[in-house]
Image: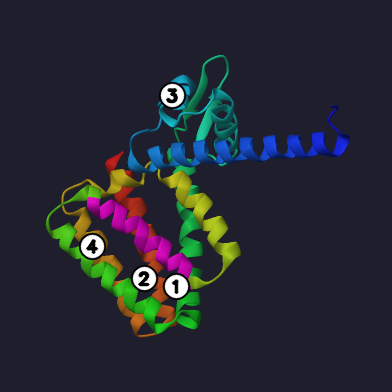
């Protein structure tokens, strides 16, 4: 029996949805590898290896790479393939400038809009971070640090800001871990987190905004010192 036009169209849409789903899975897997440090700036993306690891074809991998190139995480080198993006110092500084401005706004919005429970959760996370910082456990601290900043943006309650902020942070995963590995930096970083949490608990809008911006500025200094 011949397939009707409507059935053919439906099958095509199902195929497209499956392709998008596989592409999303591939993109998220590559992002996570960058975030965890399994892929670092300058690494080549091996489509065949990734396809085998994820149990999918190379097509979705290729599409995922294109989307991550647009997101600023990968770069396409002519006749050589896709590589994890290497950022110049000027590009890093520009991203941190933008992140600092947004961080100040995040602090203000949390003071104005966040619940007491959200603010308390942030303080408790700083306590957990202090425990791993005291042990100089960089890997554990990095994961909690990411969670802390995600929670800050969530507590700000602004979807448009969160989308822009996340795009910036995703690019900074290419380098951010480096600023934490220097001796003593975990303790210094969490002292700044404590200042942020204290300002939020006090519902001090100006102090919260300033503490957020200062933390980003200091983070840039730590990163540049590690390069």
* Magenta-colored span: 140-155
Q: CA distance from mark 2 to mark 3?
A: 45 Å
> Residue 107: which numbered mark, if any?
1
- Residue 26 in sight in this render: yes
Q: Earlier in the sequence, mark 2 or mark 1?
A: 1
Relative depth, front residue between 109 and 28: 28
Give the foreground label among 2 and 4: 4
Residue in the picture at 23% in, 52% down? 140
Residue in the picture at 43% in, 40% down? 89
Instruction: Specify the quadrant that holds the N terminus.
Output: top right
Relative depth, front residue between 123 and 111: 123
- Residue 97, horizontal then vertical, whole percent: 48, 55
What residue is pinned by disc 4?
A: 129
SS for callout 3: helix
Q: Earlier in the sequence, mark 2 or mark 3?
A: 3
Residue in the picture at 23% in, 62% down? 129
Relative depth, front residue between 61 and 180: 61
Give the foreground label among 2 and 1: 1
- Residue 44 in sight in this render: no
Instruction: Specify the quadrant that holds the C terminus.
Output: top left
Q: Earlier in the sequence, mark 4 or mark 3?
A: 3
What residue is pinned by disc 3?
A: 52
Q: In terms of image quadrants, where is residue 146?
A: bottom left
């Amino acid at each position: 029996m011949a397939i009707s036009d409507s059935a053919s169209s439906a099958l095509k849409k199902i195929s497209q949805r499956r392709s998008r789903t596989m592409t999303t899975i591939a993109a998220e897997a590559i992002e996570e590898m960058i975030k965890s440090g399994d892929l670092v700036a300058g690494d080549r993306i091996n489509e065949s290896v990734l396809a085998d690891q994820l149990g999918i074809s190379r097509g979705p991998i290729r599409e995922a790479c294109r989307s991550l190139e647009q997101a600023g995480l990968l770069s396409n080198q002519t006749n050589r393939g896709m590589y994890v993006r290497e950022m110049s110092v000027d590009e890093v500084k520009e991203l941190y400038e933008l992140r600092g401005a947004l961080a100040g706004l995040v602090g203000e919005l949390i003071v104005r809009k966040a619940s007491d429970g959200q603010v308390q959760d942030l303080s408790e996370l700083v306590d957990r971070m202090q425990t791993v910082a005291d042990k100089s456990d960089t890997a554990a601290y990095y994961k909690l640090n990411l969670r802390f900043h995600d929670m800050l943006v969530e507590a700000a309650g602004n979807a448009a800001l969160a989308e822009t902020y996340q795009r910036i942070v995703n690019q900074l995963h290419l380098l951010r871990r480096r600023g934490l590995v220097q001796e003593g930096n975990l303790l210094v970083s969490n002292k700044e987190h404590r200042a942020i949490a204290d300002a939020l608990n006090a519902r001090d809008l100006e102090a919260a905004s300033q503490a957020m911006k200062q933390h980003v500025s200091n983070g840039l200094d730590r990163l540049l010192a590690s390069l």
